[in-house]
Amino acid sequence: MSEKEQAKQQIEELRAEIEKHNRLYYINATPEIADREYDRLLQSLEDLEKKFPEFGSPSSPTRRVGGAPLEEFRSIRHSVPMMSLSNTYSKEELVDFDGRIKKLIPDKKYTYILEPKIDGVAISLRYENGELVHAVTRGDGKTGDDVTSNIKTIRSVPLRLSAGAPAVLEVRGEVYMDTAGFAKLNEARQETGQEPFANPRNACAGSLKQLDPREVAKRPLDAIFYATGELDGISFETHEQMLQSLKNYGLRITPTYWICNEIQEVLGKLDDLENMRHEFSFEMDGGVIKINERRLYGPLGSTAKSPRWAVAYKYEPEQAETTLNAISIQVGRTGVLTPVAELEPVQLAGTTVKRATLHNEDEIRRKDIKVGDKVIIEKAGEIIPAIVRVVTEKRTGKETDFAMPTACPVCGSAIEKREGEVALRCINLQCPAQVKNWIAHYASRGAMDINGLGESLVEQLVDNGLIRTPADLYSLTKEQVAGLDRMGGKSADNLIKGIEESKARPFERVIFGLGIRQVGKRAAQILADEFKNIDALMTADVQTLEEIRDIGPIVGKTIVAYFQALESRTVIDRLRAAGVNFEQEEGSMGSELDGLTFVLTGSMESMSREEAGDKIHARGGKVSSSVSKNTSYLVAGESAGSKLDKAEELGITILDEEQFLALLGSDEKLKDDKAGQMGFGF
Ligand code: IVH
């Protein structure tokens, strides 16, 4: 056997071995090897695939995370429409459901199967000859988004089914974020000053919408399958048989289900299922009742949206009664004052609840909430529970009315209500609550990315009077930091190093970090490109700003107001004195692309769109988001979208990836060729 043939065989064996261990780990929960051993197998496969790129395959276990970010999701038509379920909320409705079935198929015998209803996002996966071809969201039921590269990052989803898979197998199921992973993700988001997700379902849906699979890979997603779409070369008699076959192919199925002979039995099992609510790693919002015999699906048929052979039963959101001990006020990142209910601790949906959100003063009035009231709280998918109502019949007369404070509870400053808003705000920009949020934003990953500076450390630094603005960070000493709670000499050193390193961040990140209202990452990038340095930006007038595409008059006014404020100018002066970078780096590699405007579309193998943009900027070129007659080049990668049509229409020069790399220069080409040889290039 030649070296090549040997490598081919070895690659195949390694893939089969890794897939086997995936199944043992994710599907059967009976792992046979240690994680280290598994990683070693994967590494060997990766090495071989790099050496012999001709044997690469999109369904190789090494290809879970990869590919450049997409520009938009491609639409895919479902070969069989993806239906939804009709909901029932009472056992009577379920008995009616059974009555309708009996009427439709009076002389047929049938059984029911009951499964948990997973609160996630519906997905359809298509396998052809055992290989994953695509993964599509439900969309409108007829067409959905192609989220294949995101789904491939879910380790329990097989990229290749076990041997004996049919010609076509479309499986439908639910992608979800497991509850423990969700809690961790939210903690991390809060640490970096990002908005936490309201519940696992939103977090899951948000993750699937990410265009960069590398980001999705960081999210704790999983999937469970419970239905089929198009099938070729296989058929199933019962739903249970189908589930077991999916499991044999290596797909995850529900951890429990019950077969019931009649509806009364289903009603009993629904209670058992409800009692298991907190035992699952996913959020369950009900049960799904399906006819087990698949030959009856045809005769029963479906309505416009849902089949007649299945129905969902939704559980009541979990509620508890407790006492409202007090109402406290939280001051948020923009100075908004939010009332929070301080409750007598109570068990609800598997956790101890001590606080509930009250949103604003109007809501307190509307629900007639008084301090000392007995209240009913509810968790309806949201992680933070809400007060549903007051148990007025339990009032003793000792309850007291609540009034919003007339000054900020954190700093004592005046508060204001802006026109058209219900919220009250603290007017003091130096309010410690606002300052903490501002500094946490400055240090966050998308801005100055200061390693080790999370929310709790910012809190301590502000509370100890060590910092009041981001500029103060640069005069912190190791001794000051080391004296704080849970900070040793080593972590203090690391923090000081992280702060020092942040001075060299690109100009656009500094602009973003300043926290100018309405100036997000993209606007910051545009401003950096346009003005090149802080002095030019600070002296720009509204007219100049509003003429810039994607800035506009409203944001323009906010920017001007920001730079007019003495506080902002002082902070900027001090940041500058500390050595923070306030200039756009002019193409350090030259300015050969000076005066040229690029539009990027589709995905490239060798770099992400962001990297491509950086390289263009570094050479003095500009990047624009839309094609116009001013576009010099359209760089079209894989699956280019409508921009390509537009560029063709306008006669703009179109570059493919190779031509683009050539334009960037010979050193770039060389580097990428090397990458190609190593297996992560073309
Ligand atoms: S069966 C043709 N089974 O709930 C019927 N759906 O509210 C296919 N869901 O669209 C659906 N768990 O996204 C089925 N065990 C389960 C489910 C389930 C969650 C979702 C699914 C469905 C929605 C209806």
Image: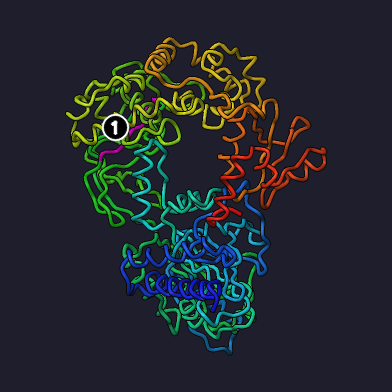
Q: Is residue 624 left or right of residue 44?
A: right
Q: How crowded is mark 1: few (under 14 residues within 10 Å), some or many (20 or more)?
A: many
Residue designated by label 1: 495
Residue at x 55%, y 66% (from the top left corner): 59
Residue at x 42%, y 73% (from the top left corner): 23
Q: Quadrant of the N terminus?
A: bottom right
Q: Is the magenta stretch mostly helix, strand or loop?
A: strand
Q: Please determine whether, in this image, residue 652 is positioned above or below residue 216.
A: above
Q: Which residues fall within the magenta stretch?
A: 335-342
- Can you see residue 389? no
Colouring:
rainbow
Q: Is residue 140 magenta?
A: no
Q: Please determine whether, in this image, residue 646 is positioned above or below residue 227.
A: above
Name the residue type under label 1.
Leu
Name the spot of residue 38 as percent of width and height, x first: 37, 67
Name the spot of residue 204 as percent of width and height, x first: 47, 53
Q: Is residue 336 magenta?
A: yes
